[in-house]
Amino acid sequence: MNTHSKLLGSDVVFEKAYCEYRLNRVESALKTIEAAPEQTDKLKELYGQVLYRLERYDDCKSVYTDLIRNSQDEYEEERKTNLAAVVASMSQWEDAPLEDLGLPESTYELCYNAACALIGQGQLTDAYNKLQQAEELCRVSLADDSDVTEEDIDSELAVIHSQMAYVMQLQGRTDEALQLYNQVIKLKPSDVGLLAVTANNIITINKDQNVFDSKKKVKLTNAEGVEYKLARKQLQAIDLNKALLAMYTNQADQCRKLSSSLQSQNPSHPRPVLIQVAQLCREKQHSRAIELLQQFSEQHPESASGIKLTMAQLYLVQGHVTKACDVLRSIEEFKHKSGMISALVTMYSHEEDIDSAIDVFKQAIEHYQSEQPGSVAHLALVREAANFKLKYGRKKEAISDLEQLWKQNPKDIHTLAQLISAYSLVNTDKAKSLSKHLPSADTMAFNVDVDELENSHGATYVRKKAAKVTGENLPKEQGWLPMRERSYYRGKKKGKKKEQIGKGTQGATAGASAELDASKTASSPPTSPRPGSASGSTTAPASNVVPPRQQKPAASGATRKKAPQKKKKGGKGGW
């Protein structure tokens, strides 16, 4: 056709574009179609498929919508199926909101695409129910064909079952998901794209466990033609997981090669950099890792938030708390969030840098005073700042916070009392003036029954009433006998220490570590990684696990020394 293009002219535009499309020369096919003098319906159908392959979903949707509106033939259902696939892709890969185009769900293909669209919106339960509906429609439609075997039905259902497993995985039902994924793999479907996605999702469940199985599964993601079957984001996710797997299998060079390639393809994406950093940390090159993170955050400030959080964590690992705080305070997006304020104040307090902690409160209060004055968050922050200053003896600095709180609620006696106490150190006249606002002693008494209060569960001291003494119960002697002269006195027991000094593990600093350990304050539920995501855990092992070089080998039966036995007293008789 290229050789005789002048002779053929525009008569073979469709045939030429179709050949280019099937040869995966999609860009050439697009140019051929757009250069055609007339856009026939047949050419428009091919145009829609080409746009879909190029992931130009919005343009593709317009083409199919126009074809459905202006065509009435036996291909209407096929066009609606293609349009449903476009809507599903927009929902999954572009986070686009669902648009009701009035598409039916009468076939299993239409039902399956509707389920995929729901997955993109996070409506997992509805999506799973829709997939079950698609499975039933598929079985019914194929049951009428006598030539179709049970194996053919299973093969046709493979894509539905793989998507069901994906939903299970997102719901945290990883054991069920893994079982269903493996069933799909065993069927050996001819669709290399389906095999690649299913294998990838198994790898994400395995994470750093069952590495041998992951190394077998990763081969399925390298099949010929996979790159033409999957969306760009799917391919990127698979490559990220390959890099993570290389890291977990100690293939450092391969990990660096894959992550560098990914970074060159998408320079602003933070995940390839995070994988490189994780690999450097495994090699104990923390300084180089921090340098890499700093370089990326400067080049791509729009993606710097997560990078800087990682950088702060690495500084903490090295014991550089102040540097970690400096990095955290540079994250504008999180700077005034309550969690960030809490973390910064805790770390500064641990370093005994009270001035910096107060400065964090000051900046945050100024922000809320400007953006949300008088809001619950604002007043809560002022309250925390006041309590913090009072805790560390900064009563003078707490005065402005306490005044602001008291003005918001003049009936708050507790805040008023704190304010008077603070002023008593710097301005006694002001303290006396404010004390006039305190309620009188009579008002505060509230007719309290002292005896009932003392006998309550919360009482720490109970005034005992003297018991009535009768003639028979009169003591024979006045006063008490000395302890040594009492009949029940047995003397002091030997071998007992007055107090046990240093209880617990020697050298333990539980107080400080618990203060900085986020896991002590809030537990995080286990999460299931999104299939295709590069969620690799690089957390440290649990604190009660002994590193290999610190483990003492157990003595064998022949060499085990017996503890010296004490001689029994009293001769025979055992006990």
Image (tube, helix red, strand yellow):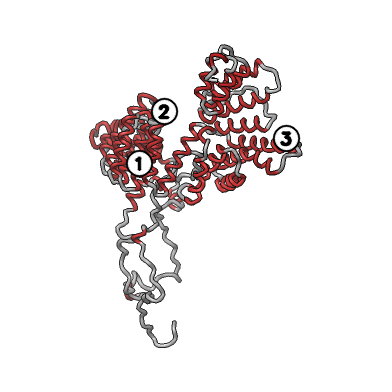
- Residue 58 picture location, percent across and down: 54, 21
Q: Element type at marker 1?
A: helix
Q: Which mark is residue 277?
A: 1
Left or right side of 204 for 406: left
- Distance between the Cα atoms at labels 3 and 1? 52 Å
Q: Is residue 572 above or below residue 114?
A: below
The amino acid type, in three-letter code, at marker 1 is Val
- Earlier in the chain: of badge 2 and badge 3, it is 3
- Earlier in the chain: of badge 3 and badge 1, it is 3
Neighbours of disc 1 within 10 Å: few (<14), some (14-19), many (20+): many
- Residue 169 picture location, percent across and down: 55, 42
Residue ranking furthest to the left: 426
Say if mark 3 contacts mark 1, CB within 8 Å: no
Which residue has dot 2 on it? 375
Which residue has dot 3 on it? 141
Q: Element type at marker 3?
A: helix
Left or right side of 141 for 415: left
Residue 72 placement: quadrant: top right
Q: Element type at marker 2?
A: loop
* Residue 391 seen in render: no
Residue at coordinates 44% horizontally, 51% vertically from top-left?
A: 458
Neighbours of disc 3 within 10 Å: few (<14), some (14-19), many (20+): few
The amino acid type, in three-letter code, at marker 3 is Ser
Q: In the image shown, does 59 or 442 lie closer to the viewer? A: 59
